[in-house]
Image: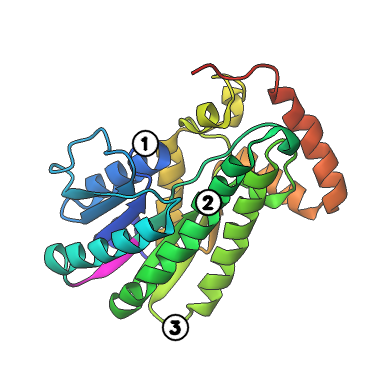
Amino acid sequence: MSSLGEEITGYAAVVVTGGSSGIGKSFMGALAKLHPRVVICNLSRSIPDINLSQLNARHVPCDLADSGAIEAAAGEVRRFLAEAAPEGRVLLINNSGFGAYGRFAEAEPAAQLGMIDVNVRAVVELTGRLLPLLRARGGAIITVASTAAFQPTAYLATYGATKAFVLHWSLALNEELRGTGVRALALCPGPTSTAFFRRAGLKAGSVPDALGQTSEAVVDEALRALARGRALVVTGWKNKLVAAVASKLPKAFAARLGAAVLSRYRLRRATR
């Protein structure tokens, strides 16, 4: 077990998806503060609203819903790291993802499929394309799941299912990687103060502040879990309690209970 500072300074480069806002942006800021010399590569459609040169970072435009774009971006990442950080461990952070609140029958099929593309396929594809590099140099993979992964989530049916996938996938991957110099950490935050809820169609304040965390708090817990060699971290003590209880309930009952809770958030849609 290493200290947080020792763990982070052990990485020469970080590759993060969705660093333009929210948890991804907080990861970039925290890592640059802990390790100013680390090279950061962000993959997202939007350029982060931060000074990339000051963070020693590079933005690689990428639509993570597009498999061809991921292949091209992975190649650019490999070329960039070969020049900017040719040696040392690499940290891959699969952060990008989005949800859509509402009944599945009322949702646009294209939006649901796009969610699967970003939340699941992009995670698997990007990790698969960069894993040979990580295995050659050593490193770690943080994949952002959610407390929604621990039970069926009515009104967030597809989103919750995608997060259940990445949670179990990350835990299984970590076991497969034992002894290779690479490990995987599944990060499961609860409600977080990001643009997630607005994109999901919920107005500000739909989820009580007492149930949420800031993205900075989520990132701090994630990095400390990484330093401790953990395979799974649920951030926030209330979220830990909810996840522990939900994971032990019969699935059908958990789905009914979750529907009763989540249906309360459908009072008003967000306005754009």
**Mark 2 → mark 1, Cα distance in angstroms:** 16 Å
195 over 115 or under it: above or below: above
**Relative to the observer, which residue lies in front, 184 or 242?**
184
Label 2 vs label 1, nearer the camera: 2
Q: Earlier in the sequence, mark 2 or mark 1?
A: 1
Q: Is residue 173 magenta?
A: no
The residue singled out by tag 2 in the image is 119
Please, what is the three-letter code of the amino acid marked with disc 1? Ser
> Residue 228: image x %, image y %?
44, 62
The image position of residue 214, as x and y in percent, is 46, 33
Magenta highlight on residue 89: yes
Q: Which residues are magenta?
A: 87-91
Where residue 107 sits, quadrant-wise, is: top right
Cα–Cα gap, marks 2 and 3 = 28 Å
Pick the quarter of the image with the N terminus: bottom left
Q: Residues within 10 Å of mark 2 (few under 14, many from 20)?
A: many
Q: Which mark is residue 179?
A: 3
Mark 2 residue type: Asn
Q: Amino acid at mark 3?
A: Gly
The residue pinned by badge 1 equals 21
Main secondary structure along the magenta-highlighted residues = strand
